[in-house]
Image (cartoon, helix red, strand yellow):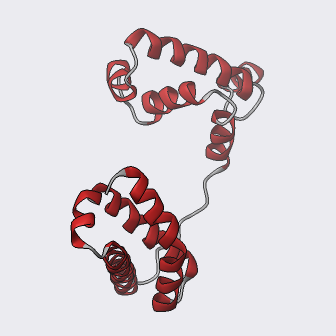
Amino acid sequence: MDEQAFDAFYAGSVGRLIGQLYAMIGDRAEAQDVVQEAFVRAWERRAALDKDGAPEAWVRTVAYRLAVSRWRRVRTSLTFAKRQGPPPDVPPPDDHHVLLVAALKQIPAAQRRVVVLHHLCDLEVKQVAEETGSPVGTVKAQLSRGRTALARILADTELDPRADRVSEVERG
């Protein structure tokens, strides 16, 4: 089946197949998802579909099997979750963490990524460069810019390193 024939096959059968799968599984969104996935798989083997002589049946069968596989995964996940019991209580983040994350959101994504990798994940500059696919010099520049931006954003907050020095001077 060439591209034009496949396009015609898709256009002529997608609505019907979604309707059929919807009737079989009872969830329209799920029917749309599995039919689309089945068509992707059909596209990959369109030459063989032409020989089978029943491409719509093949797509319908694949879509139904995909839906069943999804149900099984969900059922298995739910069974596992029930065996684990309720998740443990997780305390909310402390004020400093919230303040830091809010500040990080204000700097460009590339700078935020290298700052987090270097300072929070404890990676060396070379490791950050490897993980981000950037030259070491670029990582150093992004770190410098990110630190400068964070210092400006966090000035006069609890996370301002100068605040400790000011307190010590005021006490002294």
**Residue occupying the point 46% across, 57% down:** 7
Frontmost residue, 61 versus 88: 61
> Is residue 105 left or right of 43 when viewed as pictured?
right
Q: Is residue 126 above or below residue 94?
A: above
Residue found at the far top of this picture: 137
Indicate the quadrant where residue 57 lies.
bottom left
Frontmost residue, 130 versus 39: 39
| Place of residue 66 in the rendered image (x, y in percent of width and height, measured from the top left) | 35, 75
Q: How many marks?
A: 0
Frontmost residue, 109 versus 147: 109
| Place of residue 43 in the rendered image (x, y in percent of width and height, measured from the top left) | 34, 57
- Position of the C terminus, as image quadrant, is top right
| Place of residue 79 in the rendered image (x, y in percent of width and height, measured from the top left) | 35, 86
Q: Is residue 84 above or below residue 150?
A: below
**Residue occupying the point 27% across, 66% down:** 49
Indicate the quadrant where residue 137 lies.
top left
**Residue occupying the point 59% across, 21% down:** 146
**Residue occupying the point 69% across, 40% down:** 102
Q: Is residue 168 above or below residue 94?
A: above
| Place of residue 27 in the rendered image (x, y in percent of width and height, measured from the top left) | 54, 84
- Position of the N terminus, as image quadrant, is bottom left
